[in-house]
Amino acid sequence: MTDPRRWIYGSLDVVAALAYVAAVALAVPNRHVASAVHLYAIPVAAAVAAAGMFLGHARGRRVALAGATAWLALTFLLIVRICISAAFLAGVYGAFGKAAASFALLIVALLVEVVALLPIVQVKFLMSRAGRRAYA
Amino acid sequence: MTRRRALVLLWTLPAAILVATSALTYHAFRIAPPDRLDGPARAAAIAPLRAVLDGSGAPAPATASDAPIVLVATIWSHGRAVARVDGRGDDLAAAASYAASALAADHAVRGMAPAERADARVQLDVVAGRAPLGGDSPLLDNLALPGIADMLAIQSGVDGVGTTIAGRDVLMLPHELVAQKLVSSKQPSNAMPELAMGLDLPKLEQLLAQRAGVPRGQVPGLFRFRTDAFVEPPRASRAADTTPIPLTRGIPPRPELSAAALRAAALAGGRYLVGHLAPNGRFVYEVDLATGRQSDPKLLGGNYSLPRHAGTTYFLSELYRITGEAWLREPIERALAHMISLVDQFPCHGAPPDDFDCVLDKGERQAQLGSTALGVVALAEYQRATGDTRYAERARRLAAFLLYMQRPDGSFRHLYDPATHAPDDDAQLLYYTGESTLALARMYTVTHDERYAAAAQRGLDWSVDWYEFFLGGFFYGEEHWTCITAEALWPYAQADRYREFCDGYGAFLRDQQTAVGDLPDADDLAGAYDVTAFVPPYNTPAGSRTEAMVSAYKLDLDHGAPDPAILGQIRAALGYALGQQLRPDGDFDSVGDVDGGMPGSPVDRTVRIDYVQHVCSAMIRASEILGD
């Protein structure tokens, strides 16, 4: 019997990609090209991961791994950008402030939970024996 | 690569990258606060420039004209920068000599009369460090979150911005950025127009290009710098001590806080307002300190606010009541007469049987409750201070409007259409409920009519009870009028929950008040109410919130339970406010007779009448509770 996790992860990837597109377009629209490219790249990576999951076979697994890894890397870059912004403000103002630090930590925690968690467990599945078997 | 090594990398590399990028960014943009020169070193640096102004001759420049800028000298005369010269050299002494030579050749200085030169004050900005400018740094601009690098590029009033053109630095000093209104020039949200931040880069580049004598497009990359700034004392005090005064954000160190200092500062504020009261009874509404430009009190209209006129007159009456200074009486009466003429200009009355008058400000179709309330507060305070009942009937008719607008549950309707005689039951505007309850409480004080006290108490109950929900004790709106009313109603209303409410409000405000050490680069702002390190605080809240805290403390005293935390809060806020008030040692860069005035913020060089009103009202009331 085919491992159902392929389809579960693939479906979650599709839902996540659609949710991210909606979130970026509606909640955090911005005119900065670099930021827009970065933010829209996350749902694209999620879609690639979904395609790989649905595709099957060894090639599908490689595509899904590439998509999920890119997804993780883009999320990590987002956290790096938050840290750079905080460090810049601390450099200019001599302090970042308790409220700003708390808010930044909250944002990072939400990012990990809402954006990074799915690709983390997905990569773990794809790298496991069960994952390899599912795409044999 | 072994699995173990891969796992080690997986668990450590991301953290290492985050720490490294943060550390690199911090160090790239950090300019540590400069080590301040001591008094003798400051005096030695200024001495060659003072010698030039005194006609003692200038030293021959011993420095190449392309040497780095070490300092910039600004000569202030009657509040205006009449000359500005760079000091180049390898050390402070050489740079001061270089600047003195340049000053001796300056046309503006040569044209000054001897007395004018003696009155002039020399400011030196010794350049103390530089770093890249956010918003002009492509790597940071693309990597940081949108808006961070350009909206929060500099610390206003502390950082200057410069560029290097053909190997020569061209600098725009921190105080020049403020005077040119280049800082706090952007509003990120239309919903919060008072939240202004950011640097006006296009205008800045234009000014730097002008200064360098090149076309605007030829201004290359920009950098931030900081300075150790100091200025000569005023001529009058120079005979006793010539030691230059250190400046932070262009402001001298704070005077020592005491009841006497607060009383003197409040009276200085009163003198400012009286000095800016025209013969027609109208205040000079706004003054731009950098240019001397003022609102014209002869022009009726514009942005002149009747409620602010009333609030300012209320403060003057309060000052008269507490100090008994006779020179205040006539100006107060002149301002009240003008207020009455403005009220009569746009008739606003109830339809029978509702017999009341209301205040309709110019251009308004609906009477705003707050305008009438502050008018009543001013008239009642005048009667309270002088015993003169000439406005008693007027106050009664206006207070009748407040009673008419109150609902049975104690809340108020805030707008009234005099054409249709219909109150607006939906609109709720900031401050109006609190202002109205205070007006009714003050009416009770002067008339002893319990209708007013009962109505004020109902309004107070409604305001306090509004917070009876799950998170009610964790946040508060602008409740300063509410706490002033709670104290004003004592001993008529003695509920302990009013005291608890105001103590809670005080604790909430204390969380927004910075203390020394909270913001290492900005200890000059300690005591201000400051929601973020990134935007300089406004000065008015240090006054209006302290007015409320003085009432909260007095209410605690009435209940026999004074809260030392509130007293500390009052002292901290007024320590900050004393430092911000214009006085002779710090008015060198202000045009006109503005001592006693209160600027909008450390970087907003505008004085408006209500800034003075709130801060000085807090000062005079606090002077009554602070023992020396």
Image (cartoon, coloured by chain):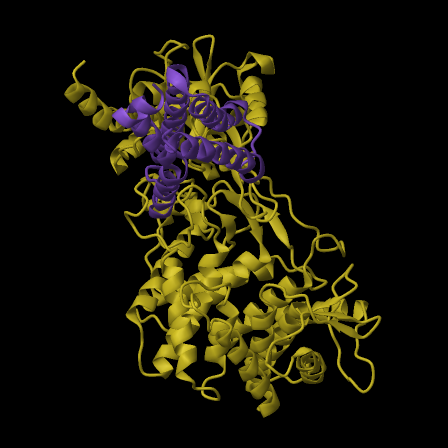
Chain A, colour shown: purple
Q: Which chain is yellow?
A: B
Residue B343 sits above or below residue B238 on the image? below
The residue under the point 48% across, 89% down is B492
Q: Nearer the viewer, residue B459 or B306?
A: B459
Q: Quadrant of the N terminus of chain A?
A: top left
Name the image quarter holding residue B555.
Answer: bottom left
Does the image show residue B110?
yes
> Could you tell whether B412 is left or right of B541 in the image?
right
Across and down, in percent, residue B447 comes to 60, 89
Residue A47 sits above or below residue B237 on the image? above
> Could you tell whether A58 is left or right of B186 in the image?
left
> Could you tell whether B549 is left or right of B368 in the image?
left
The residue under the point 54% across, 77% down is B462
Q: Which of B167 and A73 is in front in this view?
A: A73
Across and down, in percent, residue B278 comes to 68, 59
Across and down, in percent, residue B181 comes to 56, 36
Name the image quarter holding residue B160.
Answer: top left
**Number of numbered discs:** 0
Does the image show residue B172?
no
> Could you tell whether B489 is left or right of B413 in the image?
left
Name the image quarter holding residue A89.
Answer: top left
The residue under the point 34% across, 35% down is A90
Q: In which quarter of the image is the C terminus of chain A?
A: top left
